Image: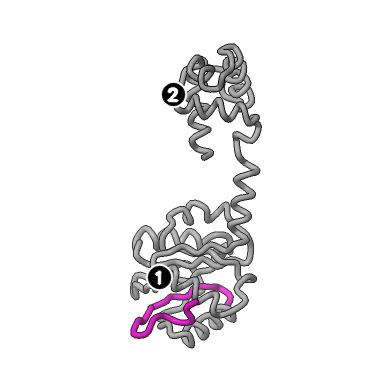
Amino acid sequence: MPSAPPAGVTRRVVVADDDVLLREGLVRLLGEAGYDVIERAGDARTLVDAVRAGQPDLVVVDIRMPPTNTFEGIDVARSIRSEFPQIGILLLSAHIELETAIDFLQSGERIGYLLKSRILRVEDLIDALERIALGGAVIDPVLVQELLGKQRRTDPLAVLSAREREVLSLVAEGRSNAGIAHRLFISEGAVEKHVRSILAKLNLPATDEDHRRVLAVLMFLDAR
C-alpha cells in the first residue's frame, strides 16, 4: 500500500471542506505525506476558482458544502470533471448519500468516494488518492454494499419466477413463442401463459402485445 506519492512525483492537491478543523487537518496530513496542497477552500465557488487557477492533479472535496450544506460538493465535482476531466476527484461524506453521487461515480475513472468515519488510517487516504491519481476508482466498501442492496431492492425483475426470467431472456434473444417452446421443451401454450404473466407482473402499459414484449426486453436488458 503506497504511503506517499512515488519518489520524484509531486502531486498538486486542492482540499475543500467547510469544516475548518477537518480541512486544515487534511492539509497537514497530505503535506506530511508528500503532497503539494496548493489551495484550500471552504465553499464551492472558492473551490472552482482554485481549480481553474491552479489546475491540480487531485481535488479532495466534501459532498456537503455551503451555502446550503446539501450537495454543492457533488455539483461542483461534476463541474470540475466536465471542465477538467484529467483531474482526479475524491469525494468525502459523513453520510451514505449514493442517490446524489451515483451518476458521477459511474464515470468510473480518477474518482473516489469515502466515508469520513471509515478513514481510520492516513495510509488508507493516501492509498485512495494514489489509486485515483493513476486512473482508478475507489469506492468505500460500505457504499458498495449499499449499492448492491439497493439494486436488489429495486430490481424490476424480482417479481418474476426463475422460469419467467428464462422465458424473458429468450424473448430478448428475439425468439418466437414457438422457438422458446422448442428450446425449453414445453408447449407453445405454456410459453404464451408465461409471457402474459411476465407482462402483467412488470406492470407494462396496456398496448399491443408486440410493443409490450419490446418494453419487457428493455427492462430485462437494463436490469442486467
Q: Which residues are magenta?
A: 1-19
Disc 1 crowd rating (10 Å Cα; few below 14, some 14-19, many 20+) is: many
| Residue type highlighted by circle 1 | Ala
Main SS of the magenta part reads loop
Q: Are marks 2 and 1 in contact (CB under 8 Å)?
A: no
- Quarter of the figure with residue 153: top right
Residue drawn at (59%, 81%), measured in percent from left and top?
Answer: 21
Which disc is residue 189 wearing?
A: none
The secondary element bearing badge 2 is classed as loop
Q: Which residue is mark 1?
A: 133
Q: Give whichever of 78, 49 is nearer the camera.
A: 78
Q: Give whichever of 86, 51 is nearer the camera.
A: 86
Magenta segment includes 177: no
- Classify residue 142 as left or right of residue 177: right
Q: Earlier in the sequence, mark 2 or mark 1?
A: 1
The secondary element bearing badge 1 is classed as helix
Residue 29 x %, y %: 52, 84
Residue drawn at (45%, 27%), measured in percent from left and top?
Answer: 173
Residue 178 x %, y %: 50, 14
Q: Marks 2 and 1, Cα distance to the nearest angstrom? A: 44 Å
| Residue type highlighted by circle 2 | Gly
